[in-house]
Image (cartoon, grey):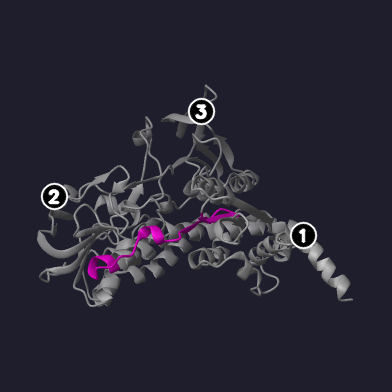
Amino acid sequence: MLERLENPGLDEELAALVEPFDRHNKTLVDNVHPVDWVNPEPAGRYHLVVIGAGTAGLVSAAGAAGLGARVAMIERRMLGGDCLNYGCVPSKALIRAARAWHDAARGHELFGAPATSGSGDFGRVMARMRELRAGISRHDSARRFRDLGVDVFIGEGRFVGPDSVEVGGRRLEFRRAVIATGARPFVPPIPGCGEVGYLTNETVFTLTELPGRLGVIGAGPIGCELAQSFARFGSRVTLLDMAPHILPREDRDAAKIVEDSLIRDGVELECGVRVVGVESRDGAKIVRYERDGDGVELAVDELLIAVGRAPNVDGIGLEAAGVRFGKQGVEVDDRLRTSNKKVYAVGDVASRYKFTHTADALARIAIQNSLFFGRAKASDLVVPWCTYTSPEVAHVGLYEQEAIEQGHEVDTLTLPMADVDRAVLDGATEGFLRLHVVKGKDKILGATLVAEHAGDLLSEVTLAIASGVGLGKIAGVIHPYPTQAEVIKKTADTWRRGKLTPFVRKVFQLFFRIFK
């Protein structure tokens, strides 16, 4: 039985994000937006003022304070930002639970496990997520950062000049500032959405009951991950997108494997369609869309919109600070400086790579460059990413077409997971590793990996690209057998065997005839 607690006095916007307000969400709020928090008195001129306490802001503040700088950090919502509160942490908890349900359902057929029957407990799934999120939240808590030496201000932060910010009636002067306000779900102007109501990644984790029918608009990473998870829980899920197929930015062969997996899990795909409106009728939400010129209606109990992210640039006084910005976010140079050389911007508000790990890396660059006259460049980063469907799709570096457009002659090597013994034993043969290398050489330009744990496996390739390690050296590294990571060594071995040209083979044959 879900035990609801009394709202401690959160405003309406925040209260909606921590529903249901149980003991787990109370712990979360106590850590990342304590209602009894008293903002400190400004401590003179700060070396660094950080606006936003998501990953980029937290890393900026903690890193600078750890080096001895006088630091202030401002957050209007909840410390931890998207990643902790309604992004990486809660979504991966749901994905893991959905995989467990899926494995239980298929275990008898594949492995002779005891047969299962009956329905699962979605409420327990969500309670587990809230409990784990609350436990992790202590790492991002206001009190922890205060103890690290950061002056933590909870409230609306706004530039009031080129070197000053105001929060809660207090004026903070700074030598340098970092904008780390992140991004929010982008909701397209679909007629009727506002009246009917919808979910985004910020509110979907407040559900306590499984929707019988779920519509998902947007077949990018967030849409695909959640569509598959809810289908595995038992919802009837329909996934809609204007693009002709899911994950349009990924390798087409990789996206096709995920597409087939979603269909097997019961997701109904409606790609190449245009949503034209939403309305309420007979207790349901009716999604109206066009397919090949024909009008179609879809009745759902809940509607999730996952079509992208919009940078948080409004309401923070960028004009007063002389900071240029646009629809894509705050404009920065390669060293993350804005048009105001005292102000830097990092994370989702200023980067096309909207990932937690990128926000972390960019924050470290901003610390170097803003406080120590560093020359670190964002363009030097090698950025991997992963979509956590089943199987996962992970990528780093260039896609083949990108490499060609940049003037590279490319050799492409593809090794299916079905050729890897551990994948066969695990019953996880869907997928492949695809490497793009400079033609005739072993230099890796990019890689796409489709596998059950692709995100965990890709780091070896990322390290190789970042460090200039070629396939020749990877082929010489001993990998433990049997592991799925052998797909990397096997692909390197395939490259090395390709060096055995007919001419080289004839030379070896001559050698062995001479030395009998």
Position of the C terminus by quadrant: bottom right
Question: Can you identify the residue that label 3 sits on?
Answer: 297
Question: What is the CA distance from the residue labelled 1 to the residue labelled 3?
Answer: 64 Å
Q: Residues within 10 Å of mark 1 (few under 14, many from 20)?
A: few
Question: What is the CA distance from the residue labelled 1 to the residue labelled 2?
Answer: 69 Å
Do residues under tags 1 and 2 come within 8 Å of each other at their CB atoms?
no
Q: Which mark is residue 503?
A: 1
Sequence-wise, the earlier of marks 3 and 2 is 3
Q: Secondary structure at mark 1?
A: helix
Compared with 513, 320 (above or below) is above
Visible residue check, residue 205: yes
Sequence-wise, the earlier of marks 1 and 2 is 2
Instruction: Judge whether residue 227 is colored magenta.
Output: no
Do residues under tags 3 and 2 come within 8 Å of each other at their CB atoms?
no
- Camera-side mark, 1 or 2: 1
Q: Secondary structure at mark 2?
A: helix
Instruction: Judge whether residue 374 is colored magenta.
Output: yes
Residue at the image point whose x is 25% and y is 48% from the top: 313
Question: Can you identify the residue that label 2 sits on?
Answer: 320
Compared with 136, 85 (above or below) is above
Question: On the rendered structure, is 448 left or right of 221?
Answer: right
Q: Position of residue 311 (x, y in %)?
A: 31, 48
Residue 440 falls in which quadrant of the image? Answer: bottom right
Query: Who is closer to the viewer here, 49 or 399?
Result: 399
Residue at the image point whose x is 27% and y is 66% from the top: 369
Sequence-wise, the earlier of marks 1 and 3 is 3
Question: What is the CA distance from the residue labelled 3 to the residue labelled 2?
Answer: 47 Å
Instruction: Give the amino acid type for the residue marked by disc 1 in the picture.
Output: Phe
Q: Which residues are magenta?
A: 368-397
- Camera-side mark, 1 or 3: 1
